[in-house]
Each structure stands twice: as structure tokens, then as C-alpha cells.
Image (cartoon, helix red, strand yellow):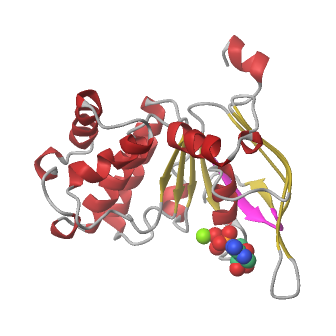
Amino acid sequence: MTGDEHQQGAHLAVHGLEKTFQGGGAALTVLSGLELEMNRGDQLAITGPSGSGKSTLLYIVGTLDEPTAGSVKVAGTDPFTRDESGLADFRSAEVGFIFQDHHLLPQCTVLENVMIPLIAAGGVDATGEERARSLLDRVGLSERSGHLPARISGGERQRVAVCRALINGPSLLLADEPTGNLDQETAEGVGTLLLELSEERQAVLICVTHSLELASRFPRRCELTAGRLVDVGAAE
Ligand code: ADP
Ligand code: MG
């Protein structure tokens, strides 16, 4: 751990996190007293039954949803003290999301899809395009940069989504069942990319997955149960 991290605490620090959904009569508490600390370069796989709050946790860490109580700090400051446009800036600079469905724009090419987050971050310039091309090269898709998403395979689309998530150099890489729609072999390749790229960039990687095979490749694994994260040992 560097001296800076000693002074500042973990890059991501979540304490006493609570999330209760209102509506439809009864309130539903999904997260309760959840604790999580991660330094840059840390990689965590989260498993847990459907409905246990895994996506809710990722959305809150990524500031797409607000906690009911508790604190979330990134690099020592609470992003939720920002106004709506400040939050959008925070997400654009610090957060890369990868979902089960790639959410690529069908009318845009592979290269254009990777560059879309540059627009929110201040515009597309030559260096932005260069970064997009080098990311596509890194994931083995240089030859596909001019294709539309419909013309590439499911695994390739997910690799494009990984590039798009990384284009602004986020410190938090949040993946919600990123291999859920892929066959075993393709899933393995996407999992490898997430692990390698987050390490190269020293991003915090949090990956929700149903795949015990994928989870077993992470240095740290937790199960989300009863609203909290519980560390689980090496997969049997
Ligand atoms: P997981 O990703 O682990 O399957 P989720 O985080 O998506 O679980 O959801 C946890 C629980 O919270 C579920 O019971 C879900 O129905 C509920 N939930 C999620 N989002 C909302 C919402 N916006 N309003 C009400 N309930 C929600
Ligand atoms: Mg989910």
C-alpha cells in the first residue's frame, strides 16, 4: 500500500450502506449495514441469489442510484454531495459500467460505440479516437472497428462494451453479469480481459457473476447475503 492510500483510506470505501425501496405498500430493505473497502487494482467477484441486491449495490457504487443511508466515498470524497451535473461528471470520469446486455448503439460502428463516452467527457478529438483504436487493438478487434454491432459476434460485442467502459480511464470498473449471455469459452475470454485490463489500469474491479468458474479467478470473492457482503474462501 502506498503512503497516499494510508493517508486517504481505501479508494472505494462503503460504510453502513442501507438501501430500502419504497412503493407498492411494503418497504423492501435490500442492503443493510454493508461494508466494503477496495484499493486501486483490487478485484472482487460478487455472487448471490437473484434478488439479493447485487445490481443495486453496483448502481449505488456507480452513483446510478442513491443510498438510503450510510456512506460511499471514492478517493476520500462522497460523490453524492454533488448536484446532478456534478454526478454526471463524476460518472463520466470515474465509472465504467458493463452490463449483461452490451447496450451498444445499433446504428453506430464499433469504433463510434467505443467513443460515445468521450462526448460526455468533453468531446471527441484525435487523441480520443487514438485511445479508442488502441483499446480495440488491445482486445483484438482492430479489424472490426468499422462494423455495426449486428455484424459481430456476442463475445465481440461484449469486448466492445469493455472498451467503451474503459475509454475515459475510470477508476471504478463495474460489471453486472458481464458474461451472462455468453457461452463458456467466450465468457472465459471476456473474464480474462476484465481481469487483465483492470490490473493494467489499476482500476477497482467489481464483477457480479453467477459463474463460479469466473468468480474463482478473482483474488477476492464475496457473497451478498442478508444485505451484506460476506467473504467466501477459495472455490472448491
Ligand atoms: P440482484 O441483482 O441481486 O438480482 P437487484 O439488486 O436487482 O438484485 O434487486 C434486489 C431487490 O430489490 C429485488 O427484490 C428487486 O425486485 C428490488 N428492486 C430493485 N430495484 C428496485 C426498484 N427500483 N424499486 C423497487 N424494488 C426494486
Ligand atoms: Mg442483478
Assign the N terminus to one quadrant of the image.
top right
**Magenta-highlighted residues:** 219-227
Q: Position of residue 215 (x, y in %)?
A: 55, 56
| Horizontal and vertical percent position of residue 211 | 51, 66
For residue 20, what is the image quadrant? Answer: bottom right
Main secondary structure of the magenta stretch: strand
Which residue is rendered at x = 55% and y = 35% of the image?
Answer: 171
Instruction: State the residue in front, 45 or 129.
Output: 129
Q: State the image coordinates of residue 105 (x, y, percent, origin top left).
A: 31, 64
Of all residues, the one furthest to the bottom in this rendering is 25
Q: Is residue 161 visible?
A: yes
Residue 165 picture location, percent across and down: 42, 47
- In the drawing, does residue 107 fall left or right of residue 123? left
Residue pictured at 71% horizontal, 67% vertical? 53
For the image, the number of numbered tags is 0
Using the rendered image of the protein, determine whether residue 204 is visible from the camera's viewpoint. Answer: no
Regarding ligand 1, which quadrant of the image does it lie in?
bottom right
**As drawn, 158 above or below 84:** below
Q: Residue 113 or 85: which is nearer the viewer?
A: 85
Query: Residue at the top extreme?
Result: 3
Picture layout, residue 19 above or below residue 76: below
Quarter of the image for the C terminus: give it.
Answer: bottom right
